[in-house]
Amino acid sequence: MSGEQRKRAAVAVVKVESRDDQVMPEAGPEFVDTAYVQDLSKRALAYLAVGYPVHFAGPAGTGKTTLAFHVAAQRGRPVVLIHGDDEFAGSDLVGRQSGYRKQKLIDNYIRSVLKTEESMNLTWSDNRLTMACKGGYTLIYDEFTRSRPEANNALLSILEERILNLPQMSGGDAGYLDVHPEFRAIFTSNPEEYAGVHKTQDALMDRLITVGLGHFDRETEVQIAMAKSGLSRLDTEIIVDVVRELRGFGVNNHRPTIRACIAIAKILAHQGARAHKDDPVFQWACRDVLNTDSAKVTRGGQSVMGEKVGEVIDTVLDSRRQTTLRVGEVRSRAKE
Ligand SMILES: Nc1ncnc2c1ncn2[C@@H]1O[C@H](COP(=O)(O)OP(=O)(O)OP(=O)(O)O)[C@@H](O)[C@H]1O
Ligand SMILES: [Mg+2]
């Protein structure tokens, strides 16, 4: 090996990947923008416009994440997404000394003389929160209560003093970073979730404007299920009415959610089936999708949900039949 080759072989460089994970979201063709959705977006955008972070809070399936993306998209700034995670530490949000750049040169060209040079530079790698603060992006922090409260501490000074504190960062003007004036944050959480969530520090909650979400209104549910499945309005309305009726039953008034409407509508559309009492696909799809543990109501140790699903389907179809008959009567009387 020549002296030059020996030198090159001895140089070791550890590279650190830099990540740039922002996206520009755009509403897809299935996105439904009803008066209900528009009202929520308008309010959220008004709060963001004056600099407040917005928090969409509500039970599962109330459209929190979709709305967060929709609102973020309307700001026209790149979007950075973080999902709350119990394993997070503060450094997972802001960044860390994630590696080092090391150079080692061993020069023993003249066998008897060994010259060693070694230099090592710590390399800081930004994580998504820091990236959003620097670039003035919109941060979506989905299900943020799944992270432990101490992991979210960095947000306190970001949201109030608009300063990002990076105590471990070395070199340059490290330490404190002014948050870009266009930086905004949208949070989502489910306050009724009891598995895998943490209580949030009052200080953080106090900095957010919380917009409480309940289930969509009927028209929005119908339009969403139609858009996602391609099923007719008539059949979709029956599915939505069955789901909404079941929601009021049992111990959990939040399930079944819009996801159940979408699932049944997709199955019917795929099978070419109809929301009719004597359509077997409709019967088994409803039983399987809706027979959840949502209603932990039992009789003689057996869940009564299956029975209840059948009853509700009958009630919904009967009441539609009655309405159609009444409308027909009114029309024929008007003609007379
Ligand atoms: N405006 C909308 N247009 C079309 N589809 C929508 C709209 N809002 C919500 N959806 C659909 O409804 C379902 C539930 O919405 P989303 O996932 O946003 O709810 P979530 O409140 O975040 O639920 P979770 O708490 O379980 O995360 C999804 O399939 C989503 O695509
Ligand atoms: Mg969600």
Image: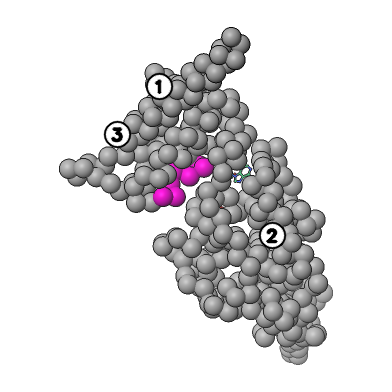
Q: Quadrant of the C terminus?
A: top right
Looking at the image, can residue 153 be seen?
Answer: yes
Q: Which residue is mark 3?
A: 307
Q: Is residue 123 magenta?
A: no
Please, what secondary structure does the residue beneath circle 1 have?
loop
Q: CA distance from mark 3 to mark 2?
A: 42 Å
Q: Quadrant of the N terminus?
A: bottom right
Q: Residues within 10 Å of mark 2 (few under 14, many from 20)?
A: many
Q: Amino acid at mark 2?
A: Ala
Q: Which residue is mark 2?
A: 44
Q: Amino acid at mark 3?
A: Glu
Q: Which residue is mark 1?
A: 277
Viewer-side residue, 22 vs 213: 213
Q: Which quarter of the figure has residue 13?
A: bottom right
Looking at the picture, does residue 78 appear above or below residue 270? below
Percent across and percent down for residue 314 are 37, 27
Q: Earlier in the sequence, mark 3 or mark 1?
A: 1
Q: Residues within 10 Å of mark 1 (few under 14, many from 20)?
A: some
* The magenta segment: 253-259
- Residue for point 37% across, 47% down: 294
